[in-house]
Image: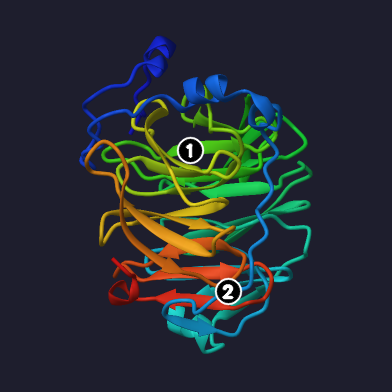
Amino acid sequence: MVRRTASRFTAALCLSAVLPLALAACSATPNAKIEEAGGDAAANMGSAEPAQSPASNNPAGRVVQFEAVRDLDTTNGVVGVRTENALLIGSIDDIANGKAEEHPLDASCGDVSASDGSFAVACDGAVNVFGQAAQTISTDLPVTSATVVSSGEVLAASDTERKVWVFKDGELSDTIDVARETDQLQAVALDGQDDAVVRISSFDTTIQDIDWQGSRQGGTLRVGLGVGKVAAGEHGLVLAADSTGNQIHVYTTDDIIRLQQSAPVPEGPWDVAWDSSQRLAWVSSLAENTATGYDISQGVPIEKKSFATVANAQSIISLDDGTVVLASATGDGIQIVAPDEQIN
């Protein structure tokens, strides 16, 4: 199916009809707040780094001993754990019990992007896809991030070139110019349309949608003062952590990308996750070793749950039953927190 497009002027508007998630209203625009703030925060915009955590203090749930984790992702109930030298794939029990499939990766390979049953990792000279659409695409392009859309195409991007490449059946089929180099690339499921795809630039803290079916770049929006990680939800939902500005941002991508909501969160947010079971947007805040879940159905994010995390929990995902999983980037373990262990 062909994805709908709209006038670029529409990107500046905040619309009230916003998909089945009932994202009913836009909060005060973060860009306006940034301009008013000025000072050191504005001067240090972009190129965010994760905050350093204090030692953990009684983290919730169960903590499994594990090596340092670079990234976590999940799709169709399967979890992918990106360590320095491998991608581990399996159920959360497989991961915890050391029974996951292990796929060796060079340390230079990028982080993992999961969608529609597949996990994509870009390496020097190849895009590796594991899971449902398993394949290896060899290329001489400088790919550093990749994602798989539900129709099977693989999109890849680079942190050194302002391009997004589209591969179909293992062959390069299109090259799209984009606004800047890319640090993250993520497919986003839509209802009755081709998947949306968004890219992130850490340098200028922006998010941009890609009209990959139309072979053109989409609109670009600022993500606060310093974007950390982004995550896709359902119905075109995208969440983003503003690490420097200490906010969570909520976007929709059904026609073009639009900012719908934002709210302050505990200091040092780095990763986000959508909990489809409890209808919560989760954010992991490193400076306070805290995970917080927000109800976004009322037009403004409202805190509903919060719990203590392991130190340096730079990755967070939510499983189909509402269990939240976090992973430490410094070897403090993988934390598994069931819904009844998430303090209200």
Residue at (40%, 29%) from the top-left corner?
Answer: 259
Residue at (67%, 34%) from the top-left corner?
Answer: 46
Q: Is residue 205 left or right of residue 143?
A: left
Q: Decide if residue 117 is in sight here.
A: no
Amino acid on which disc 2 is placed? Ser
Q: Nearer the viewer, residue 39 or 123?
A: 39
Whole-Å distance between the Cαs marked 1 and 2?
35 Å
Quadrant in the rendering for residue 256:
top left
Q: Are there few (<14), some (14-19), or many (20+) residues within 10 Å of tag 2? A: some
Dot 1 or dot 2: first in sequence order is 2
Q: Secondary structure at mark 1?
A: strand
205 over 51 or under it: above or below: above
Quadrant in the rendering for residue 165:
top right
Q: Position of residue 125 (x, y in %)?
A: 77, 51
Q: Which quarter shows the C terminus?
A: bottom left
What residue would you read off at disc 1?
197
Q: Position of residue 189 (x, y in %)?
A: 37, 45
What residue would you read off at disc 2?
56
Q: Which quarter shows the N terminus?
A: top left
Amino acid on which disc 1 is placed? Val
Residue at (56%, 70%) from the top-left corner?
Answer: 327
Q: Secondary structure at mark 2?
A: loop
Q: Is residue 209 left or right of residue 41?
A: left
Q: Position of residue 157 (x, y in %)?
A: 66, 40
128 over 226 or under it: above or below: below
Q: Is residue 110 left or right of residue 239?
A: right
Q: Position of residue 92 (x, y in %)?
A: 45, 78
The colouring scheme, among rainbow, by chain, secondary structure or one colour, is rainbow
Q: Is residue 49 left or right of residue 94?
A: right
